[in-house]
């Protein structure tokens, strides 16, 4: 059974600081997704990582994937308040639905 | 990108009544649709998977007689919450996967259900 673990689950960070969210998964997969969710909203797709060593960047967010370590990271650079949201990683286990981590609730404070 | 819509976006119903939520793929044929439930400050929990024309496959612990799923066409799936109770109040999100892009799941905007 595919399991996805995220940490930390809660993150309060100051504006301008950097931080990393980690996503570990339990079985082989070469597709990993990062989503953002704002309160009361559905999921917004941020990144799809398709292969080992994949790195994608959008603005202050950068995601990477290490399939050998079964680890993905979402790095936040110079955080701003607008990044406050819940971030989910999700892993595709073959022909199964996406399996989600528990999410990381990020709060960026002045 | 592919678009998935849900209707209604929010609904309030009384205990004991039933409510139907629709999920549509607007610009692609969804061979598989997924229904998720999300309680406040929690992750998405998969309720069931449905393939067009087949019976839905429910996850362990999800009552199939309470949460009726119909995937009658390649663009429409419905979730009916029967005899709703306050504990069914939640955010329901559908997701769809097409035949051409098997590894992509597209998410609907969600339906907020409140049972009073």
Image (cartoon, rainbow, N blue to C red):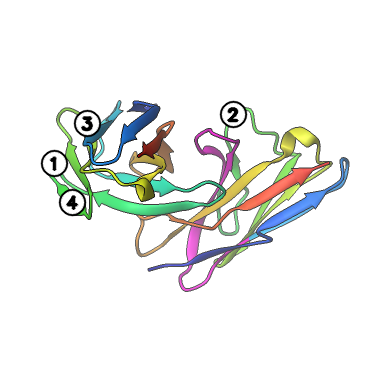
Q: Are marks 1 and 4 on the same chain?
A: yes
Number of marks drawn:
4
In this rendering, position of residue A76 left or right of residue A86? left
Q: Is residue B103 visible?
A: no
Q: Single out the mark in the foreground, 2 or 3.
A: 3
Q: Are marks 2 and 4 on the same chain?
A: no
Residue assigned mark 2: B60
Residue assigned mark 1: A52
Tell me: residue B28, above or below residue B44.
below
Q: Secondary structure at mark 2?
A: loop
Whether residues under marks 1 and 2 lie with C-beta atoms below 8 angstroms apart, the answer is no
Q: CA distance from mark 1 to mark 2?
A: 32 Å
Whether residues under marks 2 and 4 lie with C-beta atoms below 8 angstroms apart, the answer is no
> Callout 3: 10 Å neighbours few (<14), some, many (20+)?
some
Q: Is residue A46 visible?
A: yes
Whether residues under marks 2 and 3 lie with C-beta atoms below 8 angstroms apart, the answer is no
Residue positioned 63% across, 49% down in the render: B55
Q: Earlier in the sequence, mark 4 or mark 3?
A: 4
Q: CA distance from mark 1 to mark 4?
A: 12 Å
Q: Position of residue B29 (x, y in %)?
A: 48, 68
Q: Secondary structure at mark 4?
A: strand
- Which numbered marker is on residue A56? 4
Which region is colored magenta?
B23-48
Q: Single out the mark in the foreground, 3 or 1.
A: 3
Answer with the quarter of the image where residue A92 lies. Answer: top left
Residue assigned mark 3: A71
Q: Give the position of the N terminus of chain B as an image quadrant.
A: bottom left
Residue positioned 27% across, 43% down in the render: A79
Q: Earlier in the sequence, mark 3 or mark 1?
A: 1
In this rendering, position of residue B14 left or right of residue A110? right
Residue at the bottom extreme of this rendering: B27
Q: Are marks 4 and 3 on the same chain?
A: yes
């Amino acid at each position: 059974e595919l399991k996805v673990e995220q940490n930390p689950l809660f993150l309060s960070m100051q504006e301008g600081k950097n931080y990393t969210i980690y996503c570990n998964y339990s079985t082989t997969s070469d597709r990993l997704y990062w989503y953002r969710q704002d309160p009361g909203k559905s999921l917004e797709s941020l990144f799809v990582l398709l292969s080992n060593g994949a790195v994608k960047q959008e603005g202050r967010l950068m995601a990477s994937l290490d399939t050998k370590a079964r680890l993905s990271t979402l790095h936040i650079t110079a955080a701003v308040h607008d990044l406050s949201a819940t971030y989910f990683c999700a892993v595709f286990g073959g022909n199964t639905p996406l399996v989600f981590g528990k999410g990381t609730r990020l709060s960026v404070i002045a | 990108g592919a678009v998935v819509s849900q209707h209604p976006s929010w609904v309030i119903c009384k205990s004991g009544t039933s409510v139907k939520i629709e999920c549509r793929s607007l610009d692609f044929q969804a061979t598989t649709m997924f229904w998720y439930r999300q309680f406040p400050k929690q992750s998405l929990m998969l309720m069931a998977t449905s393939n067009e024309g087949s019976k839905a496959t429910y996850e362990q612990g999800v009552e199939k007689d309470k949460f009726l799923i119909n995937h009658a066409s390649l663009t429409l799936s419905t979730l009916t919450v029967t005899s709703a109770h306050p504990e069914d109040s939640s955010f329901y999100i559908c997701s769809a996967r097409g035949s051409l892009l098997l590894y992509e799941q597209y998410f609907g905007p969600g339906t907020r259900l409140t049972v009073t």
